[in-house]
């Protein structure tokens, strides 16, 4: 499946993904961006992404731990942690933006 990712410079890039992949390593390896410093254990917030409007219902709801981190980050609506998003065919065509570094 193809995803469109807007990087921190505002450049839209197409990335190929497979169902079952976790989004964070895909972004880190595919775009060469410094995200996921904690390794995906919900302790840093560096993999914050904002899903385009309408996509939140296509991914699993955030866990309590992820919700706590999103609240601590004062994340905008549609924000998720890429380390917690496992991709499925339901997100084919997803467009998201990597949040600016804090």
Image (cartoon, grey):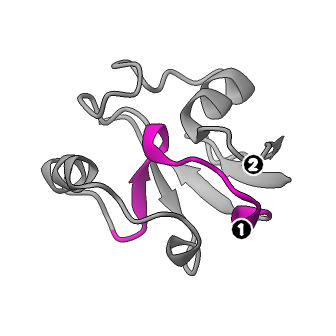
Q: Is residue 10 magenta?
A: no
Please indicate whether residue 94 sits to the left or right of residue 70 in the image.
Answer: right
Residue at (86%, 53%) from the top-left corner? 1
Question: Where is residue 89 drawn, in percent x and y?
Answer: 77, 61
Residue sitting at the far bottom: 54
Residue at (68%, 43%) from the top-left corner? 20
- Asked if 52 appears above or below 35 in the picture, the reply is below
Query: Which numbered marker is on residue 43?
Result: none
User: Which element is circle 2 on?
Assistant: loop
- Asked if 59 appears above or below 88 in the picture, the reply is below
- Asked if 22 appears above or below 10 in the picture, the reply is above
Q: Read off the residue under disc 1.
A: 90
The residue lying toward the viewer, choosing from 60 and 1, is 60
C-alpha separation, residue under disc 1 versus residue under disc 2: 9 Å
Q: Earlier in the sequence, mark 1 or mark 2?
A: 2
Query: Which numbered marker is on residue 19?
Result: 2
Residue 27 occupies which quadrant of the picture? top right
Magenta-highlighted residues: 77-92
Q: Is residue 79 magenta?
A: yes
**If the image is split into quadrants, where does the C terminus sit?**
top left
Question: Where is residue 53 drawn, in percent x and y?
Answer: 54, 78
């Amino acid at each position: 499946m193809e995803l469109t990712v807007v990087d921190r410079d505002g450049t839209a890039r197409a990335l190929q993904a497979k169902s079952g992949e976790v989004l964070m390593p895909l972004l880190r390896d595919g775009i060469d961006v410094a995200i996921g410093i904690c390794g995906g254990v919900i302790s840093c917030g560096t993999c914050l992404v904002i899903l385009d409007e309408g996509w939140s219902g296509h991914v699993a709801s955030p866990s309590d731990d992820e919700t706590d981190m999103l609240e601590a980050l004062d994340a905008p609506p549609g924000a998720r942690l890429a380390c917690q998003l496992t991709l499925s065919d339901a997100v084919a065509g997803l467009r998201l933006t990597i949040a600016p570094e804090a």
